[in-house]
Image (spheres, helix red, strand yellow):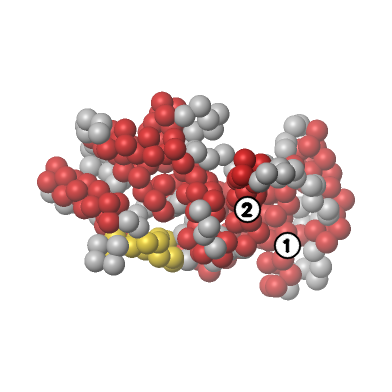
Amino acid sequence: MPLADHPHIQSFLDYLKFEKRYSFHTLTSYTTDLTEFYDYTETRFGTTALKEISAAFVRSWLASLKDNGLSSKSLNRKISSLKSFFKYHMKTGAIESTPMDKVISPKVGKRLPVFVKEEDTRMLLETLNSSTEDWKSLNAKMLIIIFYATGMRLSELINLNDNQIDFSREQIKVLGKGNKERVIPVSREVIAAIRDYQQFKNKEFDGTNNFLLVTEKGKKLYPRYAWKLVNQVLGEASTLDKKSPHVLRHTFATHLMNNGADLNAVKELLGHSSLASTQVYTHNTIEKLKDIHKKAHPKA
């Protein structure tokens, strides 16, 4: 479905891009959800007129997706896209009410975040520090170190510029979702590793690239390159089923919580907009307390 045929979708996407400053990845998700919905509506009901779309249309589409095996979590993402879409058009005056008021989101069972244990993380970092450093292994080392030290998202790290590193204050300025800035303090060891990497990069490529991390060709890291390196390292160092950069973000947050960090502070470091997103890490803290209690209390 060409977007030109549906100006309501295009105007909403323009709003997200130019006013909300959403990332390319987020815009792609909205585009996919809305075009799929409009394709279904046109095929099933013969209309895509904004004022004629009812809750029954939405429920029918969601039911078809569920019948095709889509998970509750994915269904909720599509519901969220439609809620934002119709809310925007209520604000513009294109419609007086939203059909989403009569659509109920399916319940999603909470899945605990996968993380690397503290002792395994220490061994992993020691192994990386003593490894032979060809360009790829050097990149793998930096990815693991920075992910674990900061809890950054993959997109945030690969877009990190040299000028976002504050060596004197030992902190990194991160540009997160919605172009929101946050500052993450890091250790002296991390700062030293970044400085060494920068010097090596500038010597190798004459300082022509402002991105902090680059490939062996001097180009900006791309998501698949970073993901494969992290996956390989975690695969060699752990028995986790999931071995993605996001595991290191979970590891960062879980280790902070297990060592007494304030929940609000962890929220700010992760760049979460809501405290509810951060609260999932409290479960692991409670499990650790249960284990301590079981081992230490005479009546446990």
Q: Which residue is the site of mark 2?
A: 282
- Report the quarter where the C terminus lies: top right
Q: Secondary structure at mark 1?
A: helix
Please state the total of marks drawn on the protein image.
2
Task: Measuring from the top left, give residue 35's x and y in whole percent.
Answer: 66, 47
**Image point (83%, 61%), residue name:** 101
Residue 188, by quadrant, is bottom left
Give me the disc on residue 86: 1
- The kind of residue tagged 1 is Phe
Relative to residue 101, is residue 129 drawn left or right? left
Residue 175, by quadrant, is bottom left
Relative to residue 299, is residue 248 drawn left or right? left
Task: Measuring from the top left, give residue 290's x and y in whole percent.
Answer: 66, 45
Q: Is residue 270 above or below residue 204?
A: below
**Image point (75%, 45%), residue name:** 108
**Image point (48%, 60%), residue name:** 269
Task: Measuring from the top left, give residue 92's x and y in whole percent.
Answer: 69, 72
Relative to residue 79, is residue 221 drawn left or right? left
Q: Secondary structure at mark 2?
A: helix
Mark 2: few/some/many CA within 10 Å (<14, 14-19, 20+): some
Task: Measuring from the top left, give residue 229's x and y in whole percent.
Answer: 37, 33
Q: Is residue 300 above or below residue 12?
A: above
Mark 1: few/some/many CA within 10 Å (<14, 14-19, 20+): many
Q: Nearer the viewer, residue 204 or 142?
A: 142
**Image point (29%, 67%), residue name:** 169
Q: Nearer the viewer, residue 265 or 220?
A: 265
N-terminal of the pair, mark 1 or mark 2, is 1
Q: Is residue 214 above or below residue 10?
A: above
- Report the quarter where the N terminus lies: top right
Q: Is residue 50 visible?
A: yes
The residues bearing labels 1 and 2 have C-alpha atoms spaced at a distance of 35 Å
